[in-house]
Image (cartoon, rainbow, N blue to C red):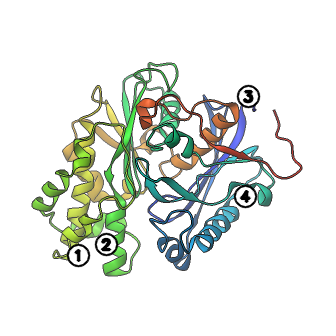
Amino acid sequence: MLKPRAVWALGTMSGTSLDGVDAAMLRTDGEVIFTFGDSAYRPYEADERTTIRAVLGAWPGDAGLEAAAEVVETAHAAVLAGFEGAEIIGFHGQTLAHDPRGRGTHQIGDGQVLAEVLGVPVVSDFRSSDVALGGEGAPLAPFFHFACAKWIGAEAPVAFLNLGGVGNLTWVDPSKTNPEDDGALLAFDTGPANAPVNDLMTKRLGQGFDKGGALALSGQADAAVVAGFLDDAYFYRMPPKSLDRDSFTGLSAAVDALSDADAAATLTACAVAAVARGMEHCPIPPARLLVCGGGRHNAALMAGLGAALPCVVEPVEAVGLNGDMLEAQAFAFLAVRVARGLPTSCPSTTGGGAAVGGGTVSTPAGRVPRA
């Protein structure tokens, strides 16, 4: 087990938007952020994205997983090999399916493979332990968001919103000492974010995403579709709660008859409406909402949030954080917590029965981890 000391950790994230692999260094003891290090991004090539997309929704034993896992491992190894000085790596893998109340959660990518290739201990499989104890297994960044709130010197409650394929919200009370303390955190998935728009762009225009939200800005949202979307049972559930990337498959069909621009505007409006509904669960309204993930580059999405919410909405760069790398940094942070035996989730973030320290540590053959 890693002793309480500051180490350079390297984290990765490949999200449900399937754009590529983020990697970032962080110096931390798993409780405090000391400094941020270098970062890098490796996009998936079109054929790699196709291979992964073909197995979205798949479970262990289904066809096509071996080829997809090889793509994920190769892409991660390529970007991670460009870093020096990491003592531990946090490898999230690629989520294919997430059904915590049913079949569980499924990420592909073998941590042991990366440990052997890179010669560094790798922590992976962050979600399974939480799911096994009745938790949602997601979101997992909230403990890192708590540390970020401390790092920026927040004195009043603040919220972090990650807009990836799915949106997730973390409300933080920075007056608390530890993330697992009562009242320190509330976290949950708000609803679909970029995934429906990305799928629309891929299907209709052969593009991976709506760059800058330009298409959505040129269209008109269909209010009836948005209202029907908000009537889904998910929005009546109390948090913590989580979603699979494809939990709202009917949403794509709901915009089939709309023009490209109106469909993009409608799907973007749904993402905004889901966040607005989710903000109603915050114990105390946050002073500001700090946005990370690819969605913060979408002007239509950000303008919609600014109009719909009663608090300041701004990208995390406004407080000196890197919104493209926050999730990769989170898994660097969580890797150190796993190695120290500290919890990585708790009842208020995933709904599990207790604070849980998930993750599996893979060590290169013949190497003894440093204490």
Q: Amino acid at mark 3?
A: Arg
Q: Earlier in the sequence, mark 2 or mark 1?
A: 2
Please tell me whether residue 258 is drawn above or below residue 270 in the rendered image: below
Residue type highlighted by circle 1: Asp
Left or right position of 294 against 40? left
Q: Earlier in the sequence, mark 4 or mark 1?
A: 4
Disc with the residue nearer the chain's start (3 vs 1)? 3
Residue type at the position of mark 2: Leu
Please name the residue that numbered disc 1 is placed on.
260
**Image depth: mark 2 or mark 1 in front:** 2
Residues under numbered marks 2 and 1 in contact, where contact means CB atoms less than 8 Å apart: yes
Q: Give the mark nearest the N terminus, 2 or 3.
A: 3
Q: Crowdedness of circle 3 by 10 Å Cα count: few (<14), some, many (20+)?
A: few
Residue 229 falls in image quadrant: bottom left
The disc placed on residue 5 is: 3
The image shows residue 74 at horizontal and vertical percentages of 67, 68
- Badge 4: few (under 14), some or many (20 or more) residues near its Cα, within 10 Å? many
Q: Quadrant of the C terminus?
A: top right
Which residue is label 4 attached to?
Answer: 114
Mark 4, mark 1: which one is toward the viewer? 4
Residue type at the position of mark 4? Leu
- Across and down, in percent, residue 231 comes to 16, 51
**What residue does disc 2 label?**
200
Q: Are marks 3 and 1 in contact (CB under 8 Å)?
A: no
Q: Residue drawn at (46%, 54%), measured in percent from left and top?
A: 103
Q: CA distance from mark 2 to mark 1?
A: 8 Å
